[in-house]
Amino acid sequence: MPRESKKARSARAAEVYDLLSEEYPAAHCELDFVDAFQLAVATVLSAQTTDERVNMVTPHLFRRYPDARALAAARQEDIEDIVRSTGFFRNKAKNIIGFARGVVEEHDGVVPRTMAELSVLPGVGRKTANVILGNAFGVDEGVVVDTHVKRLSVLLSFTGEQTPEKIEKDLMALFPRDRWTMLSHLLIWHGRRVCVARKPRCEACAVSHLCPSSRV
């Protein structure tokens, strides 16, 4: 395949975005939440498990611990029992309690709205901060790079990098800022529904003609 110019890649990326937007007009974060606190906790719990599994656990969790102050005062063992089915439950329980305590102690119980403040809270790195900012506050600070976004970005030749940080940097350079949050939703939805890891359904892909990795 001939080397693609920066201008050609940008044009192809824009077309991929538009086609995926038509394919998934309802694309959104599939974690259930009502505010930034719930989204942050759900995102931490979603590591190495499915959104569906997290959505089964969080209703009970949030009934008992409806806000940061309540969760900050929780016992580790009680949280472990509730989140056990999400896997890595001890570490996740520690992280969400730590997050809640950080919000209470440093931000008077209110989840902050900046990358700098969010990313230093326990259990929250840049990826989780991007999820919170983009979906709870409508702030396009960066691109959420999960396993689907990473895999599809490489398959679509949007990046040649392998680390989330470098992939995010390439995607931010390739797409306008106001598309950053939705871009991750579109790639995640496509990765879950069509471009699945074990057996990509290239014959059913709306962007196969724009994908250098297409099998059709």
Image: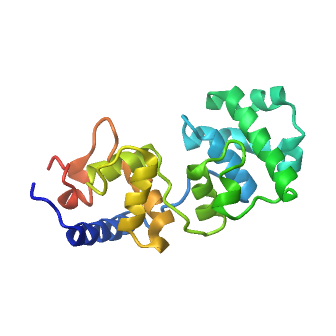
Q: Residue 165's spot in the image, x, y percent?
A: 46, 50
Q: Residue 97's spot in the image, x, y percent?
A: 79, 39
Where is the N terminus found, in terms of image quarters? bottom left
Q: Report the side of 209 relative to 129 (left or right).
A: left
Of 38 and 123, nearer the camera is: 123
Q: Residue 100's spot in the image, x, y percent?
A: 80, 46
Quarter holding residue 113: bottom right
Residue drawn at x 47%, y 47% is 146
Of 41 and 21, nearer the camera is: 41
User: From where the camera sits, is residue 109 visible?
Assistant: yes
Residue drawn at x 41%, y 44% is 163
Residue drawn at x 82%, y 29% is 76
Quarter holding residue 117: bottom right
Q: Report the side of 37 relative to 13 (left or right).
A: right
Q: How many marks?
A: 0
Of 1 and 204, nearer the camera is: 1
